[in-house]
Image: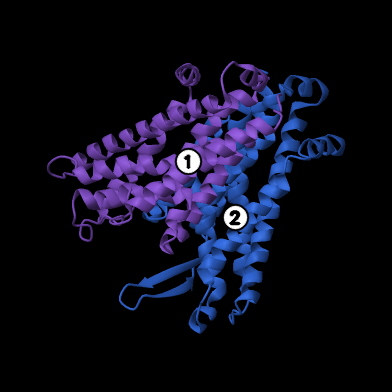
Amino acid sequence: MIKTFKTELKKIKHRHFPLLFAVLTGFLFLWLFATFRGIDDAERACGYFSVLYNFPMINTIILPLFIAVLASRIWDMEHKGNTLKLLCTLEDRKTIYLNKSILGGSFLLLFSFVECLLILAFGRIFGFVQAIPTTHIVCFFVTTSLTSLLLYFIQEILSFSFDNQIVALAVGLIGSFVGLFSLYLPRSFSQFVIWSYYSVLQTVGMNWDVNTRICTYYESPLSLGHLFVTFILFLLAAFAGKIIFERKDI
Amino acid sequence: MLKSCIKAENAKLKSSVIWILFFIVPIFPAIMGTFNYLGNLDVLKSGWYSLWTQHTLFYTDFFYAPLIAAYASYLWRMEHLNHNWNLLMTAPVSLKNLILAKFIVLFKMTALTQVWIGVLFFICGKFAGLPGMLPGKCIFWLFRGCIGSIGIIALSLLLSMVIRSFSVPIILSLFGSIASLGLVAKGAGYFWPYALMMLGMNANSADDGMMGHYATFLFSVAFFFLLFISAAVIYLKKKDVRSA
């Protein structure tokens, strides 16, 4: 298992995966930096909540497409080189699927962790006076990771099922779009859109007073029902991917 | 010779899955924009123009450039596979014609996408109970969006040619689109290719925000077109192809 996983790591060498993640992280940093530049003392008092409110929205826009790109890059190398046939004679199919899932999943977990570090970094850079909301940051890490992994497993199925990666990318693109738009619709609608779960599971809400133009943030309890549904879907997607790949005609 | 190249590029798109993307992606903003419009009738009182703001909201800001990038990636993917680069580079046509043919075919697809968006806008307007026909201004903004997309097409062609991955140029274009939001807000949209399409389509606004800036807009479009197409041709001339 470790040996075959090392093979996967060798395959991604010189394929600029770290660069891709560095670009994404840098982009997030610049986005938030532009948002928080010139904040006043009142905003510093709820700075962490503001970041925790903004991050899920940004993730809803970027991550579905980014996850489609990640899954596509991990699986498309086998389509391009026509190596799946060879690979399946050397390794157990279950192991191939597991290795590629662990590889992509590790990247996503690492990315969620980096986002948490970014939250803390922004606190330092902009001098937030609010106490670090550890519970909210942990919730953010768990919900972002879980939603990303669920989407990754779905994208994996598409990426290995279709030689032409346009299908997987189309789903990622539409997912980003539908996810973003559903944020502007009532929760009763957005809860059916899995791409919006970065926001559905967020633990910080915002009230916007149109007259005073002042935002106030409030803590909202983590929706355990939605978290449970996400977890079940995550397991189902992982299991379905394994079965589909094992039965796939190569 | 250019005509033959265009024919060849058109043949690659025949019965292609890219048309599914072409049909499906614009449907989502149309449906959602319409429901958003119907849900906010008390605030949105300018009829067709209010519906326009809801249809173009997000679509031009975030997703139109990735859609063009997907078209470009699809067109170049054929060359990146099955040693087709060798075939392409030994074809008795100039590099300029090869690139221009891809550009023209991509522009055609983008223009058709704009037409499709216009059709959906009209259908949704009627569904929402708006009176009369599509306003001429909206048709003009659709046309202007086509012109604005020229820079994105040229850049997407260059990126998809240089980056062998199908997906990376698409995510880069999403980053480009998002960056254009900030640049347009700062009044620097004319210096960024991804922002030109947003400005051209008068996205998320019922009033025309481009009055008095047409020369700058057209100059930017021409500049980015020449810059990226020349870069693509020079790159092909100087660099050896990687065929696999």
Q: Is residue B150 visible?
A: yes
- State the image coordinates of residue B168 (x, y, percent, origin top left): 61, 40
* Residue at image coords 25%, 41%: B139
For disc 1, the neighbor class at 10 Å (few under 14, some 14 to 19, many from 20) is many
- State the image coordinates of residue B109 (x, y, percent, origin top left): 41, 30
Per the image, the residue denoted by label 1 is B225
Cα distance, mark 1 to mark 2? 39 Å
* Residue at image coords 47%, 48%: B193
Give B208 or A90, whichever is nearer the viewer: B208
Chain that is coloured blue in the picture: A
Give A227 or B193, whichever is nearer the viewer: B193
Give A14 or A248, whichever is nearer the viewer: A14
**Mark 2 falls on what kind of element?**
helix
For disc 2, the neighbor class at 10 Å (few under 14, some 14 to 19, many from 20) is many
Residue B136, quarter of picture = top left
Identify residue type, mark 2.
Thr
* Residue at image coords 64%, 29%: A160
Q: Is residue B26 above or below residue A183?
A: above
Rendered shade, chain B: purple
Q: Which mark is residue A156?
A: none
Q: Which mark is residue A144?
A: 2
